[in-house]
Amino acid sequence: MSPSPSLPPPRRPAARSSFGRVSVGVYGRVMMSVAEGPFDAALMSAVKRAIALAGKRLPADRRFGDLIEIRGSLQMDADALAELRHSIHSFASLGLVAISTVFLVRPGIPGIERLPALMDIWRASRPVRRADSFPAAWALVNADLKAAGLPPQEPPPSS
């Protein structure tokens, strides 16, 4: 698990491995994460480090939108959930909090019934919304940037 120098990998389906993975990148004022489950505590710990590194590439004022695309599965054990909750709270204490978080989750993925509980973890520190397509998710991120008095961002080029 390593952060990309600029953007997460393309949004094309890839061969699935038996464990999850997450990539994190920054595109202007948008932190983009692509998460492929299932998730365990070790992966969530690695994600925390990747987000901290990506946070160094945010604008100096640290005002940014957050887009999290979840692919494959939302399956997460109790240890992973606890590690995730701890990570989100620790970022808030460091001042690394997005103006909003948009979840891109397509209908029907395994574990989707857990999505409201996961969104509640982020909701404690910011507005949270969901979209089921990349264009819709990007539009929500831009609407939140504009509402915060920040310039909208063009979406990353498709690759």
Image (spheres, rainbow, N blue to C red):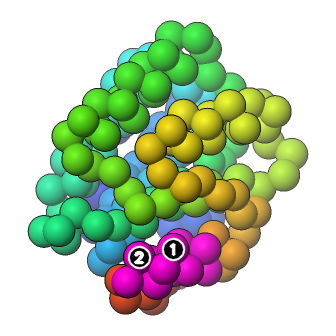
Residue 15 in view here: no
Task: Check the image and report above or below for 83 versus 115.
Answer: above
Q: Residue 32 at x, y = what percent?
A: 43, 61
Q: Residue 27 at x, y = what percent?
A: 34, 73
Residue under the image location 38 percent in, 57 percent down:
98
Q: Which residue is mark 1?
A: 144
Residue 61: say if magenta: no
Read off the magenta span. 139-149
Task: Check the image and report above or below for 100 versus 44.
Answer: below
Q: Quadrant of the N terminus?
A: top left
Q: Which of these two is toward me, 83 or 74?
A: 83
Q: CA distance from mark 2 to mark 1?
A: 6 Å
Q: Characterize the local packing of mark 2: few (<14), some (14-19) or many (20 or more) Cα atoms within 10 angstroms.
A: some
Q: Residue type at mark 1: give it.
A: Asp
Residue under the image location 65 percent in, 58 percent down:
129
Q: Residue type at mark 2: give it.
A: Ala
Q: Residue 30 at x, y = what percent?
A: 38, 69
Q: Which residue is mark 2?
A: 148
Pointer 2 and pointer 1: residues touching (CB < 8 Å)?
yes
Residue under the image location 41 percent in, 76 percent down:
148
User: In this rendering, would 11 be left or right of 136?
Assistant: left
